[in-house]
Amino acid sequence: MGSSLTIEEVYDDYADFCKSYGSPVCPKCCFRQVLPILVRRQFGLTKSHDIKRPSKDQKRDTARNGFNNLGFKHSPDAADKKDEPDGPDSKSLKTENSRLDVINEPISKQVP
């Protein structure tokens, strides 16, 4: 079984990336609408409504919106590039043979 990401996890990572580089952060409501379109275009994956994550009380799993077979990929030589954009905190979305590089730019610049 492949990895999965919730929309919330992707947004949190996107917001952290933007803040670390001083870029404006797209509002969460817009991001939730645009992300499924970008993921579908890049990877052919559709949004799922059954991504299991622990509830706030950690007693059970709850279903969240997100994407199956999608995960963050860290740069393999990240330890040598701490201050560069591809450093240890840089992440991109991936599937088996592709990366989603557009996540590294503010969403507002990507969608007409």
Image (cartoon, helix red, strand yellow):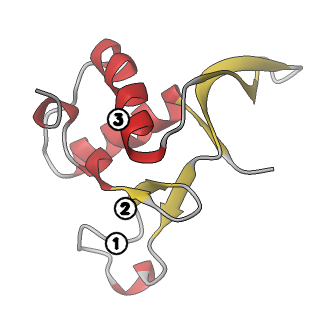
Q: Is residue 56 in view from this perspective?
A: no
Looking at the image, which residue sits at the far right? 59
Q: Residues within 10 Å of mark 3 (few under 14, many from 20)?
A: some
**Element on which disc 2 rests:** loop
- The amino acid marked with disc number 2 is Ser
Report if the CB atoms under discs 1 and 3 are less than 8 Å apart: no
Q: Which residue is mark 1?
A: 87
Give the distance between the C-alpha atoms of the residues marked 1 and 2, in whole angstroms: 5 Å
* Sequence-earlier tag: 2 or 3: 3
Above or below, comparing residue 24 to residue 21 in the picture: above
19 and 2: which one is in front?
2
Q: Residues within 10 Å of mark 2 (few under 14, many from 20)?
A: many
Q: Is residue 52 in view from this perspective?
A: yes
Horizontal and vertical percent for residue 30?
Answer: 28, 16
- The amino acid marked with disc number 3 is Leu
Indicate the quadrant where residue 15 lies: top left
Q: Which residue is mark 3?
A: 38
- The amino acid marked with disc number 1 is Gly
**Element on which disc 1 rests:** loop
Horizontal and vertical percent for residue 86?
Answer: 31, 71
At x 24% / y 73%, what residue is drawn? 83
At x 52% / y 65%, what residue is drawn? 97
Q: Which residue is mark 2?
A: 90
Looking at the image, which residue sits at the far top? 29
Q: Quadrant of the C terminus?
A: top left
At x 11% / y 36%, what residue is drawn? 109
Report if the CB atoms under discs 1 and 2 are less than 8 Å apart: yes
Horizontal and vertical percent for residue 111?
Answer: 17, 30
